[in-house]
Each structure stands twice: as structure tokens, then as C-alpha cells.
Image (tube, grey):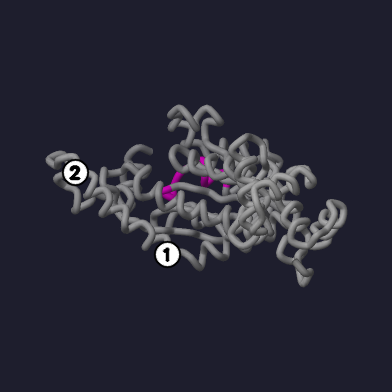
Amino acid sequence: MKDNLLETLSVLVSEERNPETMDLDTLSSIELVTRINEQDKLVPVAVEKELPQIARAVDVITHALKDGGRLLYVGAGTSGRLGVLDASECPPTFGVDQSKVIGLISGGPEAAFKSIESAEDSTDTGQQDLIDQSLSNKDVVVGIAASGRTPYVIGALRYANSIGAKCIALSCNADSAIALHANIAITPVVGPEVLTGSTRMKSGTAQKLVLNMLSTATMVRLGKCYQNLMVDVKASNDKLVARAIRIVMQATECTEEEAARVLGQSQYDVKTAILMKLTGSSYEEATHSLTESSGYLRQAIGDRPN
């Protein structure tokens, strides 16, 4: 088993030695960070090549969430932590229920803060974690693995496929094992790492960029954005209350006092407050319009006079 794994790792781009950093241990601090920065500049270019696949994935996820499904990220180690991070940011940013975007990491929640890397070696665990989430064929599973060969992720995608859930693979190595179990494969190949095998670096950065796109673009497509404002943000603490006021001010060009007043009338629902302010609607009229437009603020505003 160990010999087979060594052979597998030896052909992965993400595990190769980087010819641009062979002298890493001889560099000064400024030379070190300059070399890292030079390599990091390659990441957006690799992600750009995957935009068609990323857009396809956004459409699949958007359709699933509209149809009552969920988005589940599945990964191990750094990849799993990035999935958990992206999932945890969706409720406060977009007002989406935390049950709709879920991050699963091998080893469970503790692994997000403490290394439990051995947990990734079981395909059965990946399957069981999705069973525990009552995965259905309405859901979308995004398997994340820089290497593209993590057993935990393979097990999860294999099970998701077996019940008809849509599967997306995100890896940083071409022709990856997880891609074989996916409807869509997103593969930003960023090349060898600055520090050999440390895929928390360029590979992790590429994965973070892709996950940002998947969740943000999906939420925009779901109507959780007006212009470029987060109009479904939940005002759950002082900072977010201030942000809600600022968003209403920016969307309607009103004063802070006016924004605070209409937010109070709208029960601090930013989208409703904007619609009330722009159209002169009552709270009841605004909520009805948003229901009729399925929550799309621009559609609810329509041709109403300001």
C-alpha cells in the first residue's frame, strides 16, 4: 500500500519539486517572500482557465438550491478546512440557512482546528458522513482535494453518485481520481509548490478562489445581491447593523437617519427596507412584492417610480 502511494504521489504535479525554489533555504526574508509572491501570481491564471467549468458548477448549484437541495463541501486537511470556512461564511453574508450550505471535513469538526490527517484514509468514512447528513438526489456535493486522490473524498463522491446527487470535483492535478466520480471537474493546475508538497500554499489559494466563486456567484444568481450589495445580510451584531444601514444608504442614496428609520420599519430586513425606500411601499406591500418576485429585489422594484 505504501509503495503504491509513493508511486501515486510521484506523478502528481502538486508533489513535484519546484525548480524555481531549489535554493529556498539560502534566501533572505525579503528574497523568500518575493519568491513566494512570484509563485502566487500563477494561481489566478490557472483558475482563469477553469472558468467555463466553474460557471457550469454555479448553474448546477443554483438549480439545486432553488429546487430545495443543498450544497455540501467535502474535504480533508487544508481542503476540508477551506470548505468548512466557505460554508460557514454563507449564513452571515447571504442570509442563507446554515442547513443549506454544509462543510464536512474528515475527522469531524475538531479537525478544522487540530490536525487529524489520518482520518482522510477511509473511503467508508466519506460515505458515512454523507449518510449522516441524509444526502438526497437533490443535493450537490463538491469534493475538494488538492491531490485529487484523497480516499475520504472519493468515498463521499462515489456514494453521492450512487444516489443520483450531482458531484463536482475540485483538485489541482489533471486527470485526478476524484474527477472520475464527478459530473464537473474543476482543475486549476498551479504547478509545484514553493515548499515541496505543501499544498496549503498555491493549491490552497486556488481552491479558496474557486470556492469563493462557487458560493458568491450562486448566491448572486439566487437574488441575494442588488447591484453589488449584500442585501440579504443579517444584522446580527453591531458591525452587521452598521453594515445594513450603510447598504440601505448606498442603494437608495438616503441619509443614515433615513436608513435606520426604514430598517426599523422593515424589522431590519435590508432587502425589504430598500424596496420600501425606493418605491414608497408599506412594509406589507414590500414583503408581498418580494414574495411575488421570489426574493429578487431588482425584479420587485421593476418599473415602479422612485
Amino acid type of the residue tagged 1 in the rendering: Glu
Give the left or right position of residue 41, taking residue 32 as reference.
Answer: right
Residue 85 on image: x %, y %: 52, 41
Residue corresponding to mark 2: 30
Query: Range of the magenta residues?
Result: 146-156
Residue 247 on image: x %, y %: 62, 51
Amino acid type of the residue tagged 2 in the rendering: Ile
Between marks 2 and 1, how big is the CA–CA gap?
Answer: 29 Å
- Mark closer to the chain start, 2 or 1: 2
Image point 68% across, 46% down: which residue?
257
Give 247 or 108, whichever is nearer the viewer.
Answer: 247
Question: Is residue 46 highlighted in magenta?
Answer: no
Name the mark on residue 31: none
Q: Where is residue 250, by image quadrant?
A: bottom right
Residue 215 on image: x %, y %: 58, 53
Image point 63% across, 55% down: which residue?
219
Residue corresponding to mark 1: 48
Q: Where is residue 74, by image quadrant?
A: top right
Residue 164 on image: x %, y %: 68, 55
